[in-house]
Amino acid sequence: MKRATGRYYTGEIVGRRLALQVAEIFHRTNPSARSISVLDPFGGDGRLIEWLIEGWVSSAHPEVQWNIVIWDLDDIGFSDARRRLYRITSRYGIQPKCTFKRVDTFSEAMTKCARFDLVLTNPPWEILKPDRRELEALTSLQNEKYVSNMRAYDRWLGEHYPLSQPKRKFAGWGTNLSRVGFEASLTLVRQGGVVGAVLPASFLADDQSVNLRAHLLTKHSLDSVAYYPAEAKLYGSVDVASITVAVTVGGAPAPSLNVGTYNHATRSLEQATIKFDLETSGKVDFVIPVSFGAKALAIINRLANQFPTWLDLESSDTNSLWAGREIDETGVARWLQQRGGRAPLFIKGRMVGRYTTIEAPRLTIEKPNWSPPPSIKARRIAWRDVSRPSQKRRMIATLIEAGCVAGNSLGVAHFRDFAETPLLTLLGVMNSTCFEFQLRAHLATGHLSLSSLRKVAIPSLSQLRQEGALALLVGDAISSADSAAPMVDAYVAKNMYRLTEEEYQTILNCFAMTPSERQNYLKNYRELQDKNPA
């Protein structure tokens, strides 16, 4: 339900489950507690604390003295919160001590560090930046003061909540208040206490939240995560994807993580437990792609623990992988010429298809004070930098020949010794559903950046060099303009990543395919000889 202030209350399915989970975790870790001080620093109408107490009582945990504190920037929900807590008193015969305070939570939290046993909250999700509608109602002088005050507040937040600051800001703005609210929540709870929070789904996967995510996973114990897709519409008519997290503050990093994914068709939470390795997670910026679902996430987790990453294949060794960009396309019209002389040919993203070149390069580069990069001496893989989530396949890669130069709408890679077999096998891996499935977990934008590729688990360098059979299949896919791709895909799944048929089917289900297309992939998988029998 939308409030007059433009904020949203927590959906009941989301909030009740989180509240019950927080109650269970706190009782398990604090079994002898006789009183509980609980705070909602962004309290709204008090529903989360009401559900917490209901969850505690319904689970038959021991009676405790409840000391309840609710903060909010305005008191619009306080009367509803009082009614809710009065109902709790009447229903269960408890006598909570309740405190309501109208306050700027971010400032107040600085003076209340480690004061509470529990924090249960849904912080504001806004990006701190001037509101165009408000600016239009102000005079020029008021406008200037409004923006100046907001910039000063943004600087203050950056100084006092540094972990929440984004890696990049656009036009000077970008502080996400949900991240700041979560960081504040972690500081408000004592060692061994519990934080339960509702957050935007992007928190566990975007590249802007790396520092706060690393702090969460290395300095605290993340007990569980649940993902609720936008299409479930659990916030009334609002389409918004969310997650809930339950955290033991100051606890040792957990060796495993309970992950739930809400299935809006069955209205149930599908759960799985995945192993969690800090070293492996750190290589991929502590991303946890919960939106993929529990089964798929378990596969990503296993591959990350079993295989090296793309980055591991890159080094200065003579047989290692090199990857990068070749020429900036800025002002391209000024330095492209009709083909002639010895100048290198220019190729850009739209010319590249999967296993094929859609358009042959015809223009040459005549750029002043520019020298061709050494990489153009190699036959190499090129992949399109730009993709859209709506595309059936987002990784589009092929081979380009030596002597041409790729614009920065393409990423390129080759082996330093110009070896052909690993080049072909790597191309097959990159165009596979297994590779793209992992890659999508690290994509925050429409760009298939090299930094995203570097996080993907990939067969080892020695394995890529030994796969002559796969190299032949990839050669068939190139000569047949992609029609042999399902066989390559099945081979990569079965013999490179060593997926079971059930795991492979889980991955295929993440892609837009007709039933007959999916069955063709599985048919190829079943007909392949298993090179890695148990």
Image: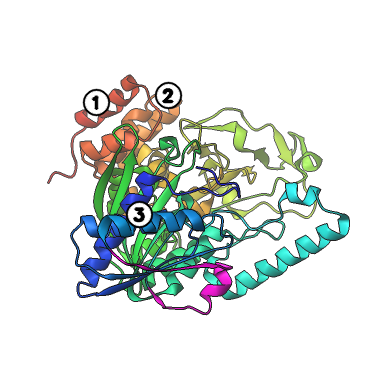
Figure quadrant of residue 52 = bottom left
The residue at the point 34 percent across, 65 percent down is: 247
Which residue is nearer to you in this view: 491 or 252? Answer: 252
The residue at the point 37 percent across, 43 percent down is: 292
Q: Position of residue 197 (x, y in %)?
A: 41, 59
| Secondary structure state at the residue bearing disc 1 | helix
Q: Position of residue 497 (x, y in %)?
A: 28, 46
How many numbered tags mark residues here? 3
Which dot, 1 or 3, sits closer to the camera? 3
Is the residue marked by circle 2 packed among few (<14), some (14-19), or many (20+) residues within 10 Å? few
Mark 1: amino acid? Lys
Residue with the mark numbered 1? 523
Which circle's residue, 1 or 3, is located before the other in the chain?
A: 3
Horizontal arrangement in the rendering, residue 386 relative to residue 510 (left or right): right
Residue with the mark numbered 2? 480
In three-dimensional space, the C-alpha distance between marks 3 and 2, rounded to whole angstroms, equals 70 Å
- Residue 100 part of the magenta segment: yes
Horizontal arrangement in the rendering, residue 532 relative to residue 394 (left or right): left
Q: Position of residue 295 (x, y in %)?
A: 27, 44
